[in-house]
């Protein structure tokens, strides 16, 4: 694929298509070579992301929220589902949206836009209340009847300070997955950067989530993808209990729920839970040393069996 007439984006798409074909044929070394060729963008912004996390830690101590308690909207309607991409956010949303009192709105970009220019310690009460009101108006457009509405934008984990400040009575659900499995799945499905960069990004996400757990004045329910696959009913009941609704058996029939799903996981949520995805990353294991090194101690979790009891709700 050295034709100079092919744009970098077209070349990436071609390599991904060839990689998918090779993977389907069981030619994993060849598939991985195509995926590496597709992900040749440099690891940009790693130091910038680290600096951003450090600024968050310095400007958002627990007192930040208590000093601004009157900024909050009392609505319980939002359900925020977040985590790294490919961590099970689509599956969790589909289970929740199968409940007759819940609407799944998909990946809303509302807070990505609103938070872009916000400086936390300069946010005033009137602006905070305006943002909350506009967000609830957006949810109303998705459903005027559902008691709860799911916003499953994965990257909202970067903006949890704002979500917790505006909606302390909302439901917060953090989706987690084996670190190597998460990064490999991102690499296979859409990442245009190297494995090292993915490992660094995962570490930064993990660091930020640790900080949120220590400082946010809300309850975060951690849901492990592996536990959800191995104990669908038990974990689904935890989800419904966390959002304060009565259990409904339709949540176990999520694959029959008809609603638009626009993520790469749309095929999976249209069929019953299957366990084949849990160890699928191992087909590329011999090529993953750069990722393992970038993840460091976080890579150890990949060698441990999934714990179906993991993922308790934490109050901070």
Image: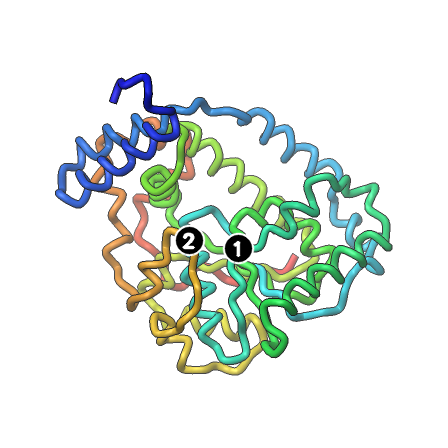
Disc 1: CA contacts within 10 A as few (<14), some (14-19) or many (>=20): many
Of helix, strand and loop, which one carries label 2?
loop
Quarter in which the C terminus is drawn: bottom right
Number of residue marks = 2
Q: Is residue 195 visible?
A: no
Name the spot of residue 161 as percent of width and height, x first: 69, 49
Q: How is the image coloured?
A: rainbow
Q: Residue at x 84, y 60 (%)?
A: 70
Q: Is residue 150 visible?
A: yes
Is residue 131 toward the left or the right of residue 302 in the image? right
The residue identified by callout 2 is: 263
The residue identified by callout 1 is: 107
Of the pair 67 and 82, the residue shown nearer to us:
82
Of helix, strand and loop, which one carries label 1?
loop
Name the spot of residue 179 as percent of width and height, x first: 39, 43
Disc 2: CA contacts within 10 A as few (<14), some (14-19) or many (>=20): few
Residue 198, by quadrant, is: top left
Q: Residue at x 35, y 37 (%)?
A: 187
Indicate whether 145 appears above or below 310: below
Is residue 291 toward the left or the right of residue 124 in the image? left
Is residue 67 toward the left or the right of residue 294 in the image? right
Whether pointer 2 and pointer 1 mark residues with C-beta atoms closer than 8 Å, the reply is yes
């Amino acid at each position: 694929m050295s034709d100079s007439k092919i744009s970098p984006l077209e070349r990436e798409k071609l390599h991904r298509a060839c990689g998918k074909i090779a993977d389907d044929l069981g030619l994993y070394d060849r598939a991985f070579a195509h995926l590496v060729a597709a992900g040749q963008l440099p690891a940009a912004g790693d130091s910038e992301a680290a600096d951003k996390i450090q600024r968050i830690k310095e400007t958002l101590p627990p007192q930040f929220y208590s000093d601004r308690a009157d900024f909050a909207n009392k609505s319980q309607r939002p359900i925020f589902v977040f985590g790294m991409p490919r961590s099970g956010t689509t599956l969790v949303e589909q289970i929740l949206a199968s409940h007759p009192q819940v609407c799944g709105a998909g990946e809303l970009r509302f807070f990505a836009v609103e938070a872009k220019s916000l400086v936390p310690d300069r946010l005033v009460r009137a602006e905070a209340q305006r943002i909350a009101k506009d967000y609830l108006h957006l949810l109303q457009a998705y459903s005027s009847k559902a008691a709860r509405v799911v916003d499953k934008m994965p990257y909202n984990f970067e903006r949890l300070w704002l979500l917790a400040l505006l909606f302390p009575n909302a439901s917060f659900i953090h989706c987690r997955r084996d670190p190597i499995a998460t990064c490999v799945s991102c690499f296979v499905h859409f990442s245009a950067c190297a494995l090292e960069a993915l490992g660094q990004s995962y570490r930064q996400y993990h660091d930020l989530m640790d900080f949120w757990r220590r400082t946010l004045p809300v309850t975060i329910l951690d849901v492990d993808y592996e536990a959800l696959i191995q104990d669908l009913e038990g974990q689904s009941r935890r989800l419904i209990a966390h959002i304060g609704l009565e259990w409904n058996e339709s949540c176990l029939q999520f694959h029959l729920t008809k609603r638009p799903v626009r993520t790469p996981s749309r095929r999976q949520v249209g069929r019953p839970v299957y366990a084949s995805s849990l160890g699928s990353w191992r087909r590329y294991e011999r090529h993953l040393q750069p990722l393992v090194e970038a993840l460091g101690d976080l890579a150890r979790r990949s060698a441990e069996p999934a714990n179906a009891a993991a993922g308790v709700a934490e109050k901070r």
